[in-house]
Amino acid sequence: MNLVVDTELPRAARWALEELTRALSMCGESVEVTAAPGSDPDFIIGLAGQSSVVEDALARAGVRCPDVPESLVLHPLAAGRFLICGRDERGLMYALLEAACAVELAAPEVDVCAAIAPAIQSPHLAWRSMQLFLCNRRLEEAWFYDEEFWDEYLERLARCRYNNLSLTFGHQIAYLSPPYPFLLEVPEFPEVRPIGFTAEQCARHLDMLIRIAEWTRQRGLHFTFGVWSQHAQDYGDSMVEGLTPEIRAQYNAAGLVRLLASCPGIDGVQFRMNYESGVAEDRQAEYYAPQFRAIAECGRSIRLDLRAKGLTDDTIELAQKLVPDTVISTKHWCEHLGMPYPMPAIQQFDQKNYRRYGTWDLLRKPRSFALIHRLWSAGSQRVLLWADPEWVRRFASSCTFGGDGFEVMAPLTNKGVRDEQPLWSASADLAFRSHAEEHRRHWMFYLLFGRLGYDPDASSEVWQRELHQRFGSAGASVEELYRIGGQILPLLTVVLQHSASLWTFWPERFVGRSLEEDAQVEPSDPTQFYGIDEYVKDALDNRLCGKWTPPQVAHHLHQLAAQVRGLLTDLGGDSTEPELRHTLLDFTLFAHLAEYHACRQLAAVHLAFHHRAGAVRRLSTVRQHLLQARDHWAALSAAAEDAYCDDLVFGFREKGHVGHWKDDLVVIERDLAAIDALIAEQQEIPSADFGPFIGGDVHLDPPTVTFASPTCATAGRDLELRIRCESPIPSAVRCYHRIAHQALDFDRVDMHSDGDGHRAVIPGDSIDPAWDLMVFFEFLFDAGRATRWPDWRIQTPYFVIPTK
């Protein structure tokens, strides 16, 4: 095959061209790359606007490559030829890699050019970043210094269309806090030295960092250096001597100057800004000013990423003055993987912690900075397989809500943090290990966030072809496992999340605290979900609203578990292929986890009714649900016992983020003992068979709705909203509205029926041109039933109306 490339390609595009030629050669094709077109070239390849051959082909085909960075064109031409072009280096690299992947995964009988799907694409999100953490010196020896690891890892990121890799130092640990002593000497401060590292080891560390940054660039990605701690604080015994409080600011600035000079591949610097960085927030601007100047004066353009938690407006203003390319990154859903939309509200207990997570007050207009949504997926997903295509698609689409992109944490984040174990793998049984490198088994996670971040409307063929290559005819069922089983973890996260911190709450391993404690939890989307105590109080007061109740969530969890079990049955459990075997195991664990928490939620609800209303006869039902929950946790533990390591260290020992599921059965026995003691205190407890819970066991689906969201709202002018409902017709409709400030409460307006639906007016003095307007609706029906719309299961459960 003749590949015409009439201009010299940039580095990343040259590598991608090599990948395409390799794929064609593996298909048995003889490949020749030439600079001038022959009589019949098979592929025309190059940069739009630079290659005359490409421009001629585009003109003849009547096609235009979008004038947007990272855009690409894959287009069939006459006589079986094919055009591959990009607007820039990345765009062309993506196009070539897509062509290579399509050829690699095509069926043998499919023609090479026919295997490549035509496409004209531009990125939906300008920033698509993967974040890796360094947190365990011993475990990192196995990959940080491994050139083969980086070659494969960076290739994966490029193929998945990420455009940034963040390598982060000093997250709640003394190791590498701050990073500079472990990398280089700072002559101005000869007294500052690392403890336990020789000069040779530091030099090796720096050399590897330089190479990683350069390799990252060669694969077409930015490289961001993350500094999350300015000193060790109380995160363990300091591993740096001589770094006194008096010199910390000057030392860290001098260290950054030398690092940026030594490592030219660093394209960005990310700082954690709140008190956890070791800097008091009232000294923030003063302390960081020398480091901002170090970036400004380094001789090249550096992107400065400031984390929003604790960030002051004065610091933002100073950073932008010194470093024009300054962005603000904020936690999308606390430190967890919750729902695939920006949180509608801040939990009550966190409203005192300014800008701790979410967009908070960062969406005020006009805004002078770009906003990046940081998905702390590692709070929820650490070791089990997770990758729901619809969740990721919705998440990527939602990141345009005030944002320019996202950063997501890699699976296995915090493995071995603050621990001194020898090398270990999460998979204990070799029969379950399909890859030498653990991260490879999470390939679906990487693929979905990268490709759907680039294009939320990407064809499902992007992952279906990979599933088919790995699992053959079982691929479609495995995709359904990811889709249905992937709904369990986010839902558990939202309704059980008793802490915003990933160091405190880990839903993959969460067995619960006491039933009474967990009944007090406010879900992390309080606009759509009831907490247990809140539900019981409203139920007894006969004033339930349209939020999902805990019994309804339990029913939904049971449904998801049943669907997962059906797929597992269809796939069979006798596979000897390690990757399929491990995949089936992980979704078996998710099914048990869903059923366990469904039973435990019901136990907690009955107990809450007892505590609030003296319903003694509910205690025997509490016990029944706890026994069912225990059976599910025991089954989960047994399924995971031989497959997973006995000591899964993915957090701090004092927080219990270690060990194995089998270690947690004692918690359930404690719950049972507490209930048995409560029962023993009663005179007599008759058995009881309760009917449906108040509000219903199954959440009511919203009616068929017709609503056109206004394109704009004007300050000072009343805004009329009209909504029409069919099948069933509600007895009343409410509208909830609020400016796009997460820490504020929603206001409620009762809508009036006017014969053609329902109508409400939002007063003009509630509309502020500095804030867009958020609205959602609630439908009330007979017998105390209610529901809210939009439905969180299908779309973002609120509309955002631009204001002026």
Image (tube, grey):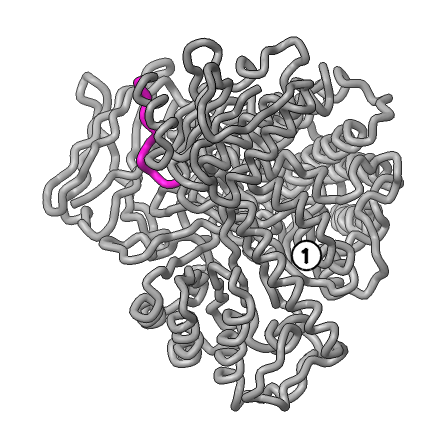
Q: Toward which corner of the image does residue 443 lie, by quadrant?
A: top right
| Residue for point 50% across, 73% down | 275
Is there any visible trace of residue 479 in the rendered image? no
Residue 118 screen position, x and y as percent:
45, 19
Residue 301 screen position, x and y as percent:
39, 62
Bin the neighbour count of mark 1 within 10 Å (Cα to Cα): few under 14, some 14-19, many 20 and up. many
| Residue for point 68% across, 56% down | 414
The amino acid on which the numbered mark 1 sits, given as a three-letter code, is: Asn
| Residue for point 25% across, 30% down | 709
Q: In which quarter of the image is the C terminus?
A: top left
| Residue for point 42% across, 60% down | 303
Residue 256 in magenta? no
In terms of depth relative to the viewer, which is nearer, 567 or 555?
567
Q: Is residue 653 left or right of residue 379?
A: right
Is there any visible trace of residue 318 in the rendered image? yes
Q: In this view, does 227 lie to the left or right of 742?
A: right
Q: Is mark 1 on a helix, strand or loop?
A: loop
Q: Quadrant of the N terminus?
A: top right
Where is mark 1, residue-wise? 414
Residue 63 in magenta? yes
Kindly report the secondary structure that dominates the magenta region of the rendered protein.
loop
In terms of depth relative to the viewer, which is nearer, 122 or 503?
122
Residue 247 screen position, x and y as percent:
53, 88
Q: In this view, does 124 lie to the left or right of 186?
A: left
In terms of depth relative to the viewer, which is nearer, 394 or 180?
180
Residue 110 screen position, x and y as percent:
61, 11
- The span picked out in magenta is 62-69
